[in-house]
Image (spheres, rainbow, N blue to C red):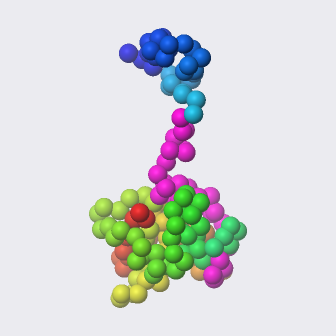
Amino acid sequence: MTALNRVPSLLARAGTASALTLAVAGGSLLVPGAAPEAEAAPPATKALQIAASKRGSPYRWGATGPHTFDCSGLTLYSFKAAGKKLPRTAAQQYNKTRHVSASHRKRGDLVFFHSGRGVYHVGIYAGKGKIWHSPKTGAVVRLERIWTRSVWYGRVR
């Protein structure tokens, strides 16, 4: 049964058309008040989209947006806009995430670059081995391939 064929039965169950207004658009049922896909996206997906929207924003040490960022400032800003709170620095952010293996990483997870036990950089995993990040002085927010194996992954709770 197609969505178009279900409209009469849904209206009948609702009692009256005024009790439940249904619109048919391109074979999909749209119910007023229901969240569109973009609004229903999980926070990690929203944070990834927000970070990507900051492409080209300049790096500035200590900056947390909305126009300039350092690495952890970008992740802090992106997740805050998506409704999740993170601490300020990359190391603090690592300590607040649920650690996941590389084989279980997902888009929107944080990628922490480390030397020994010290975390020195963070970005947001974009999939296919790439991250959105604000790399260094003189650079801008950009999508870049992960360049080392010395990374840990963390999922924001």
Name the image quarter holding residue 150. bottom left
Can see residue 39? yes
Tell me which residue sits at (58%, 29%) in the image. Answer: 32
Can see residue 5? no
Numbered marks: total: 0
Q: Position of residue 64 (x, y in %)?
A: 63, 73
Q: Is residue 90 magenta?
A: no
Task: Check the image and report above or below for 51 versus 9.
Answer: below
Kindly give the residue lying farthest to the right in the view shown.
Answer: 67
Q: Which residues are magenta?
A: 34-63
Tell me which residue sits at (34%, 70%) in the image. Answer: 99
Tell me which residue sits at (53%, 35%) in the image. Answer: 34
Q: Position of residue 127 (x, y in %)?
A: 43, 59
Residue closest to the eye, 30 or 149: 30
Quarter the C terminus occupies: bottom left
Q: Position of residue 117 (x, y in %)?
A: 36, 87
